[in-house]
Image (spheres, rainbow, N blue to C red):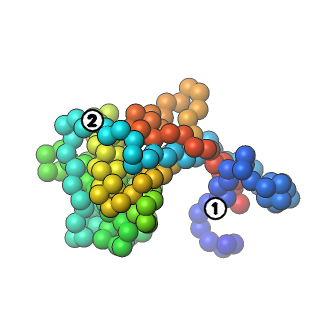
Amino acid sequence: MRGKAGNRFVQLNVDAASEEVRNWIQTKDLHEHGPGWAKLTRSASSSSLESPGRVHTRRVKVDEALLFGSMMCKGFNFPLTLVSLWSAIVGKEGWSCFFALDGETPIGIGAIYVSGTFAWLGGGTTLPEFRNRGVQKALIQIRTDYGITQGVSTFVVETEVPSLGKPNISYENLRKMGFQHAYNRKNFKL
């Protein structure tokens, strides 16, 4: 990995890691970086949720892949060099991508990857100027509804670990939408 640009991390649930893995982290002198990630899960059998409001959603079409990738990068403040990476998932087997709309204009995005009875929700972001309008709740709802139609029984997702004094709207939205905290993973910088 030397000679490559960018940061690299090992993400680890320290509480579940073996002694051997914890010793490896120490011998490599890896240090925690940032708050880490909270993993949340939701059963499809959880009680159905009320519609989150007025925000409409729809599937992303293959010819809109570039817009999806661009919105991913803008929403998460990712470098634009990642647009093609995120655009590439639109229309791929297992992946379904969604827009949240203001009228007909896409203002938020989210993706779901389905494999058997499990699904991962990711890439949920809203363009900064449209935040605090229920966009993420609508995207969580459409993705879980879609997953259920595909036979999903368990959904998983991750977001930044909540910390004192720093609100985590993503975490709170997921909890409001029926997700339960499962565990935390820490980032160790390589």
Q: Residues within 10 Å of mark 2 (few under 14, many from 20)?
A: few
> For this rendering, which residue is in front, 59 or 133?
59
Q: Residues within 10 Å of mark 1 (few under 14, many from 20)?
A: few
Task: Say if 170 sits above or below 98 in the image.
Answer: above
Residue 80 shows in this picture:
no
> Quick one: SS at disc 1?
loop
> Quick one: SS at disc 2?
loop
Q: Label 1 near label 2: C-beta < 8 Å?
A: no
> For this rendering, which residue is in front, 190 or 79?
190
What's the mark number on residue 8? 1
At label 2, the amino acid type is Glu
Disc 2 target residue: 50
Quarter of the image where one finds residue 147: bottom left
Spatial separation of the CA atoms under disc 2 and disc 1: 40 Å
**Mark 2 or mark 1, which has the lower sequence index?**
1
Task: Say if 9 sits above or below 88 in the image.
Answer: above
Quarter of the image where one finds residue 113: bottom left
User: Quarter holding the C terminus?
Assistant: bottom right
